[in-house]
Image (tube, helix red, strand yellow):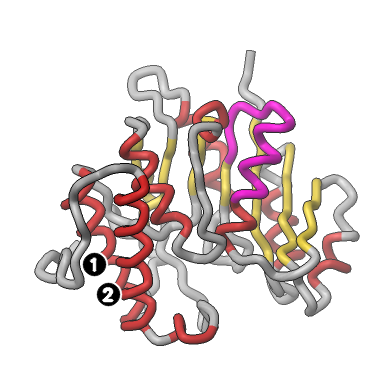
């Protein structure tokens, strides 16, 4: 019996990309959920043009983490076996959806989470990451490896596949871009089987806002360290992240 697979895309004000991305996603996925996280730019109207998809709407913008949490609940409520998440800004390639889903039940190395990595393999179409985002990713990735015993290469890739039955054990509370850091700590402490899969590194010539003060890279890095420390404490783990964690490590 084949797995029931749900592909979920958090969306906030993606009027420039959502139509083209969904058209391509529907070539590779049967069941698609879009979480419209309070869009105000016409994205919601475009979603109405795709009657074959599921749409969960947040009345106001709650944040990236809150949108993922909605996807997790939907997948569990509707008894899917595998959940694939990807962004809707044109930086993830839908052609990898089935590959990621299949890796969850790989005969030789089954997994609870497959996490995309833009740094474990080079592709001819790769583009350079913005310097501040690359620096923060490298630092946080090194911290996670050092403190949790992981061997990952990309802490922040949103292209992932999950075994839905494992999601019930998560207790995620951060509604913003730091929520995936809670996820890494919890997944490691729960003993999840985690693997990475290489994906192209595609950055469009667009500026992303992380929200208010978090647009400052140093403020954002300090916030990520704080979230990680809080999660370690909440899970009863003794190690502490420090400001220089991973400073000398290059991914």
Alpha carbon of mark 2 to alpha carbon of mark 1: how far?
Answer: 6 Å
Q: Give yes or no for contact between labels 2 and 1 (Cβ–Cβ under 8 Å).
A: yes
- What residue sits right under mark 2 in the picture? 135
Q: Main secondary structure of the magenta part?
A: helix
Secondary-structure class at tag 1 = helix
Image location (x, y in percent) of residue 178: 45, 63
**Which residue appears at 56% of the width and 58% of the height?**
65
- Please give the range of residues in magenta: 69-83
Magenta residue check for 71: yes
Image location (x, y in percent) of residue 155: 35, 57
Residue 200 occupies quadrant: bottom left
Residue 14 occupies quadrant: bottom right
Image quarter of the C terminus: bottom left
Residue 52 occupies quadrant: top right
Q: Is residue 85 left or right of residue 112?
A: right
What's the mark number on residue 21? none
Most extreme residue toward the left, as rendered? 248
Frontmost residue, 133 versus 68: 68
- What residue sits right under mark 1 in the picture? 139
Image location (x, y in percent) of residue 158: 49, 56
């Amino acid at each position: 019996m084949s797995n029931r697979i749900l592909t979920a895309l958090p969306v906030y004000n993606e009027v420039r990309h959502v139509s083209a991305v969904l058209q391509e996603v529907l070539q590779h996925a049967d069941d698609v959920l879009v979480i419209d996280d309070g869009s105000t730019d016409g994205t919601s109207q475009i979603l109405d043009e795709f009657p074959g998809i599921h749409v969960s709407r947040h009345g106001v913008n709650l944040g990236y983490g809150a949108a993922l949490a909605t996807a997790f609940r939907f997948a569990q409520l509707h008894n899917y076996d595998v959940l694939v998440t990807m962004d809707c800004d044109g930086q993830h390639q839908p052609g990898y959806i089935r590959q990621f889903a299949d890796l969850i039940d790989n005969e030789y190395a089954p997994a609870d989470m497959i996490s995309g990595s833009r740094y474990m393999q080079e592709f001819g179409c790769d583009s350079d990451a913005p310097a501040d985002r690359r620096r923060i990713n490298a630092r946080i990735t090194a911290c996670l490896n050092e403190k949790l015993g992981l061997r990952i290469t990309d802490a922040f890739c949103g292209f992932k596949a999950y075994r839905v039955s494992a999601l019930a054990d998560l207790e995620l509370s951060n509604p913003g871009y730091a929520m995936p850091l809670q996820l890494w700590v919890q997944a490691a402490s729960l003993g999840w089987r985690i693997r990475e899969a290489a994906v192209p590194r595609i950055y469009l010539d667009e500026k992303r806002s992380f929200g208010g003060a978090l647009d400052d890279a140093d403020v954002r890095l300090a916030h990520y360290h704080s979230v990680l420390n809080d999660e370690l404490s909440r899970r009863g783990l003794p190690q502490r992240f420090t400001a220089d964690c991973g400073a000398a490590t290059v991914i």
